[in-house]
Image (spheres, helix red, strand yellow):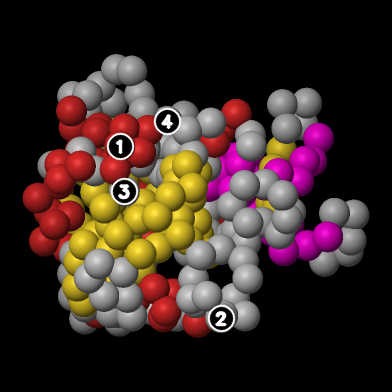
Amino acid sequence: MSQINRYAEQMTATVLSNKRVGQYHQILLGVGQVVRHCRPGNFAAISVGGENSSLILRRAFAISRVSDRADGTMELIVAPHGAGSRWLCAQGENAPLDMVAPLGTPFGIPTTSVQALLIGGGYGSAPLFGLAEVLKSRGCRVDMILGASTASKIYAPLEGKRSVNSLKIYTEDGSTGIMGKVTDPLEQLISDGQVDVIYSCGPMGMLSAISSIAQNSDVVHQCAVEESMACGIGVCMTCVLPVRSDDESLAMVRSCIDGPVMDGSRVQWHLVGQIPGSTP
């Protein structure tokens, strides 16, 4: 297994609770002392579907936060979209889960206090709450922008408000917060010197738009990409993304190993989904 996953363990996690929160499920797992090695941005790969399922490959789920209380707990926020996530959301208390964690490259944490802006789209915002706690413990100012198409897709806005110095909510239909997109205030915030680093998590289109705005500034953009990660450990090569290397050449890197957190300025967003060398 890659050095990046040197702390990963295969384990049997236990479902401690499974609560419906709006359109999503907040699932709390008992995972033991593996929480000591979990960092904001890591993910877990879970075997879904049960013993007789045709869902052979694991499914990747972002780790929302961990706690060393109760012998180690891990929180996942899951949207019941596909067959695998629906199966996971149907698991009740005390259900065992075959899981590998922690996996992937986490968010980089600054060594000095900075002005951090956290931007989340839909339930993709969940990992940002644990990140906010870490950043505030380092003396950083932490502002957050949450967005979605409609109010029901905003995950835990009250929790977000408790976690940061300031919170703004944007919905495309104006059903809550400000009508618009999370990127609407970004250019002005950067121009006003209110942002040193952006941490983002959400749909790929949102991450691309943030990178486009930040690229002409000195602001660092760390984004957790949302590519489908089938194996989670860099073997299957299904989650590759086009990224600019140090020598300016194009490299196809694995989201599960080199990510999910990446430098947004290096991802070649206009080439995502294309075969290298092909004509768009």
Tell me the quarter of the image containing the C terminus: bottom right
Q: Closer to the N terminus: mark 4 or mark 3?
A: 3
Q: In the rendered structure, does residue 228 fall within the stretch colored magenta?
A: no
Q: CA distance from mark 1 to mark 3?
A: 7 Å
* Spatial CA span between label 4 and label 3: 24 Å
Q: Earlier in the sequence, mark 3 or mark 2?
A: 3
Q: Position of residue 181 (x, y in %)?
A: 36, 66
Mark 4 or mark 1: name the one nearer the start of the chain.
1
Q: Secondary structure at mark 4?
A: loop
- For badge 4, the amino acid type reads Gly
Q: Residue furthest front?
A: 51
- Point 71% across, 44% down: residue: 253
Residue closest to the eye, 235 or 78: 235
Q: Which mark is residue 31?
A: 3
| Range shown magenta | 249-275
Q: Which residue is mark 4?
A: 108
Mark 3 → mark 2, Cα distance in angstroms: 24 Å
> Which element carries disc 2, helix, strand or loop?
loop
**Mark 1 or mark 2, earlier in chain:** 1
- In space, the residues marked 2 and 4 are separated at their CA atoms by 40 Å
> Which disc number belongs to residue 33?
1
Mark 1 to mark 2 CA distance (whole Å): 30 Å
Q: Residue at x 56, y 63 (%)?
A: 58
Give the number of the mark in front: 1 or 2. Answer: 2
The amino acid sitting under disc 1 is Gln
Contact flag, marks 4 and 1 (Cβ < 8 Å): no
Q: Nearer the viewer, mark 4 or mark 3?
A: 3
